[in-house]
């Protein structure tokens, strides 16, 4: 049975374009997650303000509120390959600029935030097209395996990238990490340039008409309402870990960039482990049971971090947080994907990403501000209880148990 499962899982890798993109995105995702460590740690070296440190993840996520819905419209109206080429090239150029400015000593907190915001803009347009394009490559019977492989590639990068990034920042500084991230986009861009395909005929309509139709569909769809509301509530509380973890590593655990990267890597290892188990869990448990367990474990992990002054205990807490995070997020993502007809796929995913990343960005600002008022441990403890309050929504807005595909992580950017 295991041999049959493995054979089905790797079947999409027999498709040359998918295999090439899959390998390229592993490298690109590692570069992106290394970059995140470098940006967060660079800000801590330029300021002691918890608010400014919290603004780094906020600058990466809040652009979704501005252009995320437009990105979904573009993914449904225009060739996704062309959109991906433009956005990948833009992110590559911005990472290169960050590396050169940091290397030359011209970087400042506000320039760092501005370039991070620009990368976030490109990523917000990239994401709906990226999460939709898998179905342009592989046949329908292989969709579950294809998206599971994509999720595994991102979570592998989440386990490796932060640790490598932290070590490189400690050894050579963040400029090298930014430059390496820029180079990591080259593989994806090269594959997209080589990928020649016949674009499907798309419905002719204006951008605003397409956006209006997508919004009308989302508002009227009971199946969409539950995951959108619940992922927004989840993101508000869960964002605390990204907002304060750099300062937690430096000021509470007294670690350097290598230690900070290892904390993120522990989270990534937990994410990778659960990503391989979620398909099996969904066969025996209702999605809301998985989400409920994830919420309780994530809240407990945050409360453990709030009381921890130990590096090993913090590693355990973040490992458990990675398990819980992905277990819950996959259920929200699946609930959206399985309730949307193909014509609305890009726009539906853009609404989902706006809700998730928008709430994460706003939450990062709030938790950064709160850490300046009540301290880092108090902020993590408050966030834990905020996450736990999401259990109420399970009874009010239950998820559908339907499953057609197991989708990737909504944070996947490459």
Image (cartoon, helix red, strand yellow):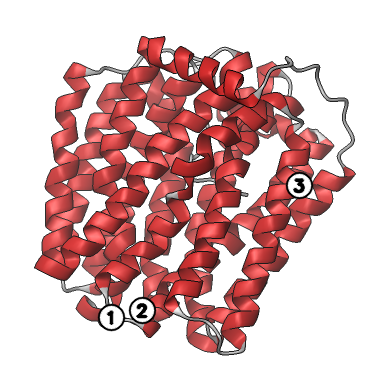
* Left or right for 68, reference 26: left
Q: CA distance from mark 3 to mark 1?
A: 38 Å
Verify CB contact (< 8 Å) between mark 2 and mark 1.
yes
Q: Residues within 10 Å of mark 2 (few under 14, many from 20)?
A: some
Q: Name the secondary structure under disc 1.
A: loop
**Residue 119: horizontal and vertical position, in percent?**
57, 58
Residue bearing the label numbered 3? 85
Q: In percent of the image, x 64 and y 35: which residue is there?
A: 129
Determine the residue positioned at 31% across, 61% down: 243
Q: Position of residue 87 (x, y in %)?
A: 68, 49
Instruction: Indicate whether 56 appears above or below 309.
Output: above
Circle 2 residue: 44
Residue 20, image quadrant = top right
- Residue 166: x and y, percent? 47, 75
Q: CA distance from mark 2 to mark 3?
A: 33 Å
Q: Residues within 10 Å of mark 3 (few under 14, many from 20)?
A: some
- The secondary element bearing badge 3 is classed as helix
Q: Earlier in the sequence, mark 3 or mark 1?
A: 1
Which residue is found at the position 51% from the left and 32% from the top? 350
Distance (Cα) linking label 2 and label 1: 6 Å
- Helix, strand or loop for disc 2: helix
Is 168 in front, or is 375?
375
Give percent across and percent down for residue 115: 55, 66
Identify residue for label 1.
48
């Amino acid at each position: 049975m295991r041999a049959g499962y493995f054979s089905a899982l790797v079947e999409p890798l027999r498709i040359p374009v998918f295999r090439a993109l899959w390998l390229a995105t592993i490298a690109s995702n590692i570069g992106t997650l290394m970059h995140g460590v470098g940006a967060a740690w660079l800000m801590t070296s330029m300021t002691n303000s918890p608010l400014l440190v919290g603004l780094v993840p906020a600058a990466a996520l809040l652009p979704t509120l501005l252009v995320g819905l437009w990105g979904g419209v573009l993914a449904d109206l225009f060739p996704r390959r062309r959109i991906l080429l433009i956005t990948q090239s833009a992110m590559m150029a911005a990472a290169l600029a960050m590396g050169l400015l940091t290397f030359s000593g011209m970087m400042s907190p506000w320039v760092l935030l501005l370039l991070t915001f620009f990368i976030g803009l490109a990523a917000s347009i990239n994401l709906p097209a990226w999460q939709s394009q898998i179905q342009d490559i592989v046949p329908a019977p292989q969709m579950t395996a294809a998206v599971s492989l994509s999720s595994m590639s991102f979570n592998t990068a989440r386990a490796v990238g932060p640790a490598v990034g932290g070590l490189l920042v400690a050894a050579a500084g963040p400029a090298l990490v930014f430059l390496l991230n820029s180079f990591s986009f080259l593989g994806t861009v090269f594959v997209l340039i080589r990928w020649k395909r016949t674009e499907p005929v798309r419905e002719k309509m204006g951008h605003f008409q397409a956006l209006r139709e997508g919004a009308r569909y989302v508002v009227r769809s009971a199946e969409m309402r539950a995951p959108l509301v619940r992922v927004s509530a989840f993101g508000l509380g869960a964002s605390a870990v990204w907002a304060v973890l750099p300062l937690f590593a430096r000021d509470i655990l007294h670690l350097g960039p290598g230690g900070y990267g290892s904390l993120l890597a522990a989270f990534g290892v937990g994410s990778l482990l659960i990503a391989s188990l979620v398909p099996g869990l969904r066969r025996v448990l209702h999605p809301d049971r998985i989400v409920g367990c994830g919420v309780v474990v994530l809240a407990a992990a945050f409360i453990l971090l709030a009381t921890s002054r130990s590096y090993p205990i913090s590693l355990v807490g973040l490992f458990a947080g990675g398990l819980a995070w992905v277990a819950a997020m996959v259920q929200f993502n699946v609930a959206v994907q399985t309730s949307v007809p193909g014509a609305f796929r890009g726009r539906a995913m853009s609404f989902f990403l706006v809700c998730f990343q928008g709430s994460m960005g706003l939450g990062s600002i709030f938790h950064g501000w709160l850490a300046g008022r009540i301290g880092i441990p108090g902020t993590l403890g408050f966030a834990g209880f905020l996450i736990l309050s999401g259990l109420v929504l399970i009874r009010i807005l239950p998820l559908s148990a339907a499953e057609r595909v197991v989708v990737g992580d909504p944070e996947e950017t490459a």
